[in-house]
C-alpha cells in the first residue's frame, strides 16, 4: 500500500510538471531531495553515535538492567498473558528502555525480537495476539524522555535551541501512551472470552414441615 502511494505521488508530480511545461522541476526536486537526505543523515550520525555510546556505557554499568527491573511491574500489568520469566518480557523491557531514551534505532531490533517471541506464544499464527497488539501500541506511542532523533534534526537545521522540545515531547508522549493503554485495556476487556458459567447440578430443595 505504501509503495502504491509513493508511485501515485510521483506520477502526480510528474504529470503536474509536464502540464505546466516545467518538467525540469522534477529533476531539480530529485537532486535537491537526495542532497537534503544525505545532509540530514550525516547530521544525525554524530548525535546517534553519541547516544548509542552512552547506552552502551549504561548497559555495561548495569543501568539498563536496573531500569528494566523498574519497568518489570509495569510490563507485567501491560502483558498479563505472557508467562513470567519468558524471554519476550526481557526484549519488551529492553525495547521500552531504548524508547524512553529516544533511541528508536536501538529499540527496533529489540521490538522485532519481542514480536518473534510473542508469536511463539500466539495460538493463531495468522492473527496478532493481544500481547502483540499491546506491544505495537506501546511501541508506537512510547513515552520519550529525551527525543534524541528530533534534537539531532533540529541541530542539523541550525535551530537556536534544539533541546527546547524536550518538555513538550514528554507531555505529548505521556498523553499518547496513556491513550494507547486505555484503548488497549478497553479492547482487551471487550473481546475477552465470557466467563464460564457454573455447570454444577442444582440440588433439590428439601421439604420442610
Image (cartoon, rainbow, N blue to C red):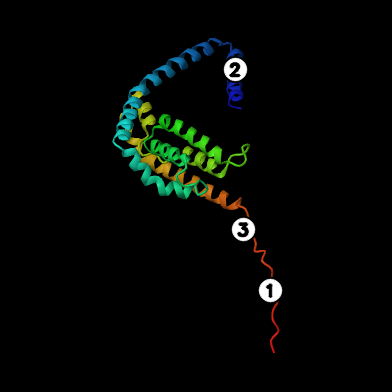
Position of the N terminus, as image quadrant, is top right
Q: Looking at the rendering, which quadrant does residue 93 occupy? A: top left
Compute the Cα span from label 3 to label 2: 60 Å
Q: Would residue 191 appear left or right of 144 to someone viewing this image? A: right
Q: Can you tell which quarter of the image residue 51 is in?
A: top left
| Upstream in sequence: badge 3 or badge 1 | 3
Query: Which image quadrant for residue 10?
Result: top right
Give the Cα separation between the discs numbered 2 and 1.
81 Å
- What residue is shown at x 51% (from left), y 39% (from top)? 136
Gap in angstroms between the C-alphas marked 3 and 1: 22 Å
Disc 2 crowd, CA 10 A, few/some/many (<14, 14-19, 20+): some
Q: Is residue 66 among the parts visible in the rendering?
A: yes
Residue 50 screen position, x and y as percent? 31, 27
Reading the image, the residue beneath label 1 is 203
Determine the residue positioned at 61% across, 37% down. 125
Residue ID for mark 3: 195
Q: Nearer the viewer, residue 206 or 67?
A: 206
Q: Which residue is mark 2?
A: 16
Q: Nearer the viewer, mark 3 or mark 2?
A: 3
Secondary element type, mark 3: loop
Amino acid at each position: 500500500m505504501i509503495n502504491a502511494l509513493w508511485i501515485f505521488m510521483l506520477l502526480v508530480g510528474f504529470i503536474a510538471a509536464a502540464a505546466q511545461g516545467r518538467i525540469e522541476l522534477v529533476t531539480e526536486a530529485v537532486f535537491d531531495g537526495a542532497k537534503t537526505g544525505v545532509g540530514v543523515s550525516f547530521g544525525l550520525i554524530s548525535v546517534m553515535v553519541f547516544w548509542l555510546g552512552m547506552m552502551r556505557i549504561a548497559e555495561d554499568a548495569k543501568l539498563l538492567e536496573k531500569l528494566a527491573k523498574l519497568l518489570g511491574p509495569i510490563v507485567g500489568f501491560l502483558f498479563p498473558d505472557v508467562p513470567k520469566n519468558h524471554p519476550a518480557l526481557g526484549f519488551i523491557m529492553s525495547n521500552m528502555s531504548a524508547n524512553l531514551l529516544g533511541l528508536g534505532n536501538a529499540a527496533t531490533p529489540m521490538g522485532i525480537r519481542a514480536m518473534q517471541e510473542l508469536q511463539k506464544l500466539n495460538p493463531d499464527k495468522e492473527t496478532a495476539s493481544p500481547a502483540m497488539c499491546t506491544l505495537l501500541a506501546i511501541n508506537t506511542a512510547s513515552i520519550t524522555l529525551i527525543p534524541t532523533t528530533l534534537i539531532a534534526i533540529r541541530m542539523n537545521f541550525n535551530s537556536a535551541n534544539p533541546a527546547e522540545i524536550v518538555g513538550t515531547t514528554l507531555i505529548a508522549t505521556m498523553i499518547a501512551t496513556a491513550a494507547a493503554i486505555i484503548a488497549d485495556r478497553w479492547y482487551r476487556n471487550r473481546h475477552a472470552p465470557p466467563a464460564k458459567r457454573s455447570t454444577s447440578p442444582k440440588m433439590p430443595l428439601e421439604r420442610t414441615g
